[in-house]
C-alpha cells in the first residue's frame, strides 16, 4: 500500500484552531502522521491513490480513501478518527457497532438484500480488531464505502425525505428483537433532556467564556421551556411509553440514498444506537430535514418547519416502523419534534457557552447560529401545533 496524491486539506475539518476561537478544550486536529499510521494498520488491499476529508458530520473526523486494485479497479473506503471527547469508551462503542451490523447483515440476507450496501461493514485492523489505536492514543475505524449512494444535508426532493423516514423507521423495526441489554450506553443520558437542561443551567452559571451576556434572550428561551425538557422523562417514569432500540441521531445525512433507485438504502452513523424513544428518532429527523433552511442559517426569516415535509416524514416513518408504534407513541410524534429541536438548540447554546468543545465549528459563533435556527423552529412548531397534530391523526390507524 502506498500513499497517493498528497492531500493538503487532510488536517481535519475542525478547521479553526484553538487560538482563533479562544476555546479551551477543543480536540487536537488530526495530523498527517496519524492518518498515515491508521492507513497502514487496516486490512486494505491495493495502492492508495486518493485520500481526502469527507462529509459534514459534527463529531468524527471522516476521510475517504481510494485504492487501486489490479483487475478490480478502484475501491473506496471510509476511515474515521473517533471523537474520544464525545465517545469516552470507543471499544464498547465498536462492540455495539459490530453487534448491530452483524445482526442487520443476517436480516438483510434473509430478506434478499445486499448486505454490502444496506448496512455498514466494518473493515478490521491488521490485528483483527475493529479499531486501531494510533501513537497518540486516538481510536480509528474503517467502513466499506456505500457505493453509488448519496447523503444530503438538506432535502432536495421530498421523495428523498420520505425515503429517509422509511429507512429510519425500518431500521428500528429490524432491530425490534435485538437484545437491548447487550448494548452499551455510548453517551450517558444522550437524550435525557431534563439532565441536559440541568447541564445547560450549570454552563450559564459557570459562564467560563464570559459569553452569557451576549445571549440573554436565548438563555431566557430555554428557561421558559423547562416543561418541554421534562415531558418524556415523566411519561417514561409512569410507564406510558416504551424504550426501543433506536438510532438516536437521525439526521438526513446519516442515511444513504441510492443514486439510481432513489431508495433509502443504508442507515449510517451507528455510534448512538441505544435503547431510546421512537419520538426522539422521529423528532431529530424533523428538526433537521423538515426545516426550510440549513441548520446553521444566519437569516432566521428563512427558517421554518415545512408542514408538507412534516407530512411526508410522518407517512414514511410510520410505514417504515411497520405499524409497530403504540397509539400513544404516534400521538406524541409532534412532541418528539419539539423536544428534539429544543434539546438540540439547548446543546448548541451550552457548547457556545462552554467554548465550542463538543460540536465541530467552522466559523465564529457557529454554535450560536445553530442554536438560533433550532429555537426559531421550536417557535414555529408552537404556532403550527394543531396542524402537526392533525397530520399525525390522519396517518393514525
Ligand atoms: P459524524 O458522526 O461525524 O456525523 P458519520 O459517520 O455520520 O460521522 O460520517 C460523516 C459523513 O461521511 C456521513 O454523513 C456520510 O456522508 C459519509 N459516510 C460515512 N460513512 C460512510 C460510508 N460507509 N459510505 C459512504 N459514506 C459514508
Ligand atoms: C451530531 O454526528 P452528527 O453530525 O451526525 C450529534 C447529534 C446532533 C447533531 C446536530 C453524537 O450529529 O446528536 O443532533 O450533531 N451527534 C452526537 O447536527 O452528539
Ligand atoms: Mg453523521
Image (cartoon, rainbow, N blue to C red):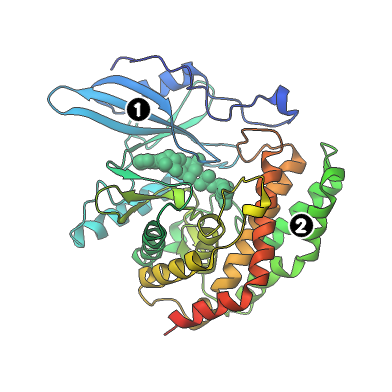
Residue drawn at x 55%, y 56% as measured from the top left: 292
Total marks shown come to 2
133 over 240 or under it: above or below: above
The image quadrant that residue 36 belongs to is: top left
Residue 37: percent from left, percent from top: 42, 19
Q: In front here: 5 or 160?
A: 160
Percent position (x, y) of residue 128? 32, 33
The response on whether ligand 2 sits within 8 Å of label 2 is no
- Residue drawn at x 63%, y 65% is 339
Residue 373 can be seen, yes or no: yes
Q: Is residue 389 left or right of residue 55?
A: right
Q: Which residue is mark 1?
A: 65
* Residue at x 59%, y 48% (from the top left corner): 295
Q: Decide if residue 149 is on the left or right side of residue 305.
A: left
Residue shown at 64%/26% (left/top)?
16
Q: Which mark is residue 277?
A: none
In the picture, the disc for residue 198 is 2
Q: What is the C-alpha distance between the residues marked 2 and 1?
A: 41 Å
Q: Nearer the viewer, residue 181 or 203?
A: 203
Give the quadrant of residue 104: bottom left
Q: Is the residue marked by circle 1 packed among few (<14), some (14-19), or many (20+) residues within 10 Å?
A: many
Q: Residue furthest front?
A: 301
SS under mark 2: helix
> Residue 7's spot in the image, x, y percent?
43, 18
* 209 with respect to 252 (left or right): right
Nearest to the observer: residue 391 or residue 266: 391
In the image, taking residue 159 as reference, residue 235 lies left or right, namely right
Assess disc 2: are there few (<14), some (14-19) or many (≥20) residues with their C-alpha within 10 Å of its C-alpha. few
Q: Position of residue 171 (x, y in %)?
A: 37, 61
Q: Earlier in the sequence, mark 2 or mark 1?
A: 1
Amino acid at each position: 500500500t502506498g500513499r497517493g496524491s498528497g492531500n493538503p486539506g487532510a488536517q481535519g475539518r475542525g478547521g479553526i484552531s484553538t487560538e482563533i476561537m479562544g476555546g479551551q478544550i477543543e480536540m487536537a486536529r488530526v495530523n498527517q502522521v496519524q492518518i498515515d499510521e491508521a492507513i497502514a494498520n487496516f486490512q486494505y488491499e491495493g495502492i492508495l491513490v486518493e485520500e481526502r476529508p469527507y462529509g459534514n458530520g459534527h463529531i468524527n473526523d471522516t476521510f475517504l480513501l481510494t485504492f487501486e486494485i489490479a483487475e478490480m479497479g478502484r475501491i473506496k473506503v471510509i476511515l474515521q478518527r473517533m471523537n474520544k471527547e464525545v465517545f469516552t469508551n470507543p471499544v464498547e462503542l465498536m462492540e455495539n457497532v459490530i453487534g448491530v451490523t452483524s445482526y442487520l447483515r443476517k436480516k438483510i440476507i434473509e430478506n434478499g438484500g445486499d448486505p454490502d450496501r444496506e448496512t455498514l461493514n466494518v473493515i478490521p485492523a491488521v490485528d483483527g480488531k475493529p479499531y486501531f489505536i494510533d501513537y497518540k492514543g486516538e481510536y480509528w475505524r474503517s467502513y466499506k464505502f456505500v457505493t453509488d449512494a448519496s447523503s444530503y444535508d438538506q432535502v432536495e426532493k421530498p421523495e428523498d425525505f420520505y425515503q429517509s423516514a422509511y429507512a429510519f423507521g425500518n431500521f428500528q423495526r429490524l432491530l425490534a428483537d435485538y437484545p437491548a441489554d447487550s448494548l452499551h450506553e455510548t453517551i450517558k443520558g444522550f437524550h435525557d433532556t431534563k439532565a441536559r437542561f440541568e447541564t445547560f443551567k450549570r454552563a450559564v452559571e459557570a459562564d467560563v467564556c464570559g459569553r452569557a451576556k451576549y445571549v440573554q434572550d436565548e438563555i431566557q428561551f430555554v428557561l421558559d421551556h423547562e416543561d418541554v425538557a421534562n415531558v418524556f422523562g415523566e411519561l417514561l417514569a409512569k410507564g406510558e411509553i416504551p424504550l426501543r432500540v433506536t438510532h438516536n441521531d437521525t439526521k438526513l445525512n446519516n442515511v444513504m440514498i441510492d443514486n439510481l433507485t432513489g431508495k433509502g438504502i443504508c442507515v449510517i452513523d451507528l455510534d448512538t444506537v441505544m435503547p431510546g424513544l421512537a419520538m426522539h428518532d422521529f423528532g431529530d429527523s424533523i428538526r433537521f430535514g423538515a426545516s426550510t433552511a440549513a441548520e446553521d442559517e444566519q437569516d432566521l426569516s428563512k427558517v421554518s418547519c415545512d408542514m408538507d415535509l412534516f407530512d411526508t416524514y410522518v407517512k414514511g416513518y410510520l410505514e417504515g416502523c411497520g405499524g409497530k408504534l403504540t397509539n400513544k407513541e404516534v400521538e406524541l410524534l409532534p412532541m418528539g419534534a419539539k423536544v428534539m429541536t429544543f434539546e438540540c438548540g439547548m446543546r448548541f447554546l451550552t457548547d457556545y457557552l462552554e467554548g465550542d468543545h463538543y460540536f465541530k465549528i467552522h466559523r465564529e459563533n457557529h454554535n450560536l447560529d445553530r442554536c438560533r435556527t433550532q429555537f426559531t423552529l421550536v417557535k414555529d412548531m408552537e404556532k403550527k401545533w394543531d396542524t402537526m397534530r392533525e397530520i399525525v391523526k390522519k396517518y393514525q390507524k
